[in-house]
């Protein structure tokens, strides 16, 4: 049976995972866009992303675009599966 | 290893969490769908407006007008798409550029092969040439709108309705606007694109 995931359950990380899972599998979002969209500070977003990356729910890649450093992220297959299980658990609590 | 929480949220908390998930996912999808489209619509709306207004006021500019404005448009498009590509990495995004390039190449090629344009040098020649150019202009204005309609069938009905509405306005102007046809195109065609771009920017957040 699906259970709530403690890592995803924190409100900020729930929002981060929601945004990343909404992307198609091959798409990646850059750090600045995500922080603007979720209205999180760079430090806050960075800390939560680190937690999600350590759990292997998120893959973070750094690269240079037009000679400027950019950080891109996407949800991993494991992250997507855990997120889906978390959503199912929430629905069960709601009786959906 | 997955960490599972033993502190079960209440039903209200779970409902709020699901609502937040839906909101953020919808916001993300809409931000990606919007992509560079608002900026591109405003850019090309301004180009249509400038080109058609100039045609209305100073027809001899036709010989060079669209070439210059299209070059500006393509450069601007490249710049806008390049900025957007740094925000969302999406493999296959280059296909949109190929699609638009191929579409206009096809349209321009067949016009030159089937109905090559000889630019008028005198006022008399312009009077004779104007009805032909009027139809060619209407044709070219409907091409991107046709692409919107087809794209809208698969990727969002909003684009389809925009394409149909502007095509309707172009055809209406062709038969009803008389000597103010190019002014009509500037306001309805260019104006519609700019207005749509501004609406997308304001509403699709």
Image (spheres, rainbow, N blue to C red):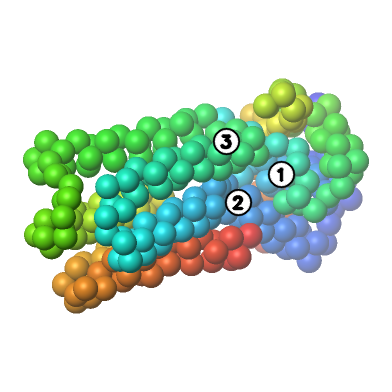
Residue topped by disc 1: A33
Residue topped by disc 2: B31
Are labels 3 and 1 assigned to the same chain?
no
Q: Secondary structure at mark 1?
A: helix
Residue B129 lies in what quarter of the image? Answer: bottom left
Label of residue A87 in the image: none
Query: Local crowd at mark 1 within 10 Å, few (<14), some, or many (≥20)?
Result: some
Q: Does residue A89 sit above or below A24 in this rendering? A: below
Residue A62: x, y in percent? 75, 24
Depth check: give the residue in front, B164 or B14. B164
The residue drawn where x is 46% and y is 31% is B94
Residue topped by disc 3: B82
Q: Secondary structure at mark 3?
A: helix
Can you tell which of label 3 and label 1 is closer to the viewer?
Answer: 3
Residue B173: x, y in percent? 23, 71
What is the chain identity of the residue bearing mark 3? Answer: B
The C terminus of chain B lies in quadrant: bottom right
For the residues labelled 2 and 1, the Cα–Cα distance comes to: 10 Å
Q: Does residue B100 sit above or below B26 in this rendering? A: above
């Amino acid at each position: 049976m699906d259970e709530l995931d403690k890592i995803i359950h924190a409100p900020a990380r729930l929002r981060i995972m929601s945004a990343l899972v909404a992307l198609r599998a091959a798409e990646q979002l850059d750090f600045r866009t995500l922080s603007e969209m979720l209205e999180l500070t760079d430090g806050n977003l960075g800390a939560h992303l680190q937690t999600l990356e350590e759990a292997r729910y998120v893959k973070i890649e750094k690269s240079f675009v037009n000679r400027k450093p950019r950080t891109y992220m996407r949800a991993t297959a494991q992250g997507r599966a855990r997120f889906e299980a978390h959503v199912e658990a929430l629905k069960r609590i709601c009786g959906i | 290893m997955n960490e599972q929480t033993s502190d079960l949220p209440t039903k209200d908390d779970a409902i709020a969490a699901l609502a937040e998930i839906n909101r953020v996912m919808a916001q993300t999808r809409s931000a990606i769908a919007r992509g560079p489209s608002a900026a591109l619509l405003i850019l090309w709306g301004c180009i249509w407006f400038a080109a058609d207004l100039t045609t209305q006021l100073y027809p001899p500019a036709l010989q060079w007008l669209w070439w210059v404005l299209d070059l500006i448009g393509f450069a601007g498009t490249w710049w806008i798409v390049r900025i957007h590509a740094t925000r969302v990495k999406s493999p296959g995004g280059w296909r949109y550029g190929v699609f638009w390039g191929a579409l206009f190449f096809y349209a321009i090629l067949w016009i030159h092969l089937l109905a090559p344009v000889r630019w008028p040098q005198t006022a008399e020649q312009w009077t004779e040439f104007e009805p032909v150019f009027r139809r060619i202009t209407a044709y070219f204005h409907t091409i991107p709108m046709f692409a919107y309609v087809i794209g809208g069938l698969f990727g969002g009905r909003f684009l389809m309705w925009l394409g149909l509405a502007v095509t309707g306005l172009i055809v209406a102007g062709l038969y009803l606007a008389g000597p103010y046809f190019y002014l009509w195109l500037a306001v309805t065609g260019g104006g519609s694109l700019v207005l749509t771009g501004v609406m997308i920017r304001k509403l699709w957040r």
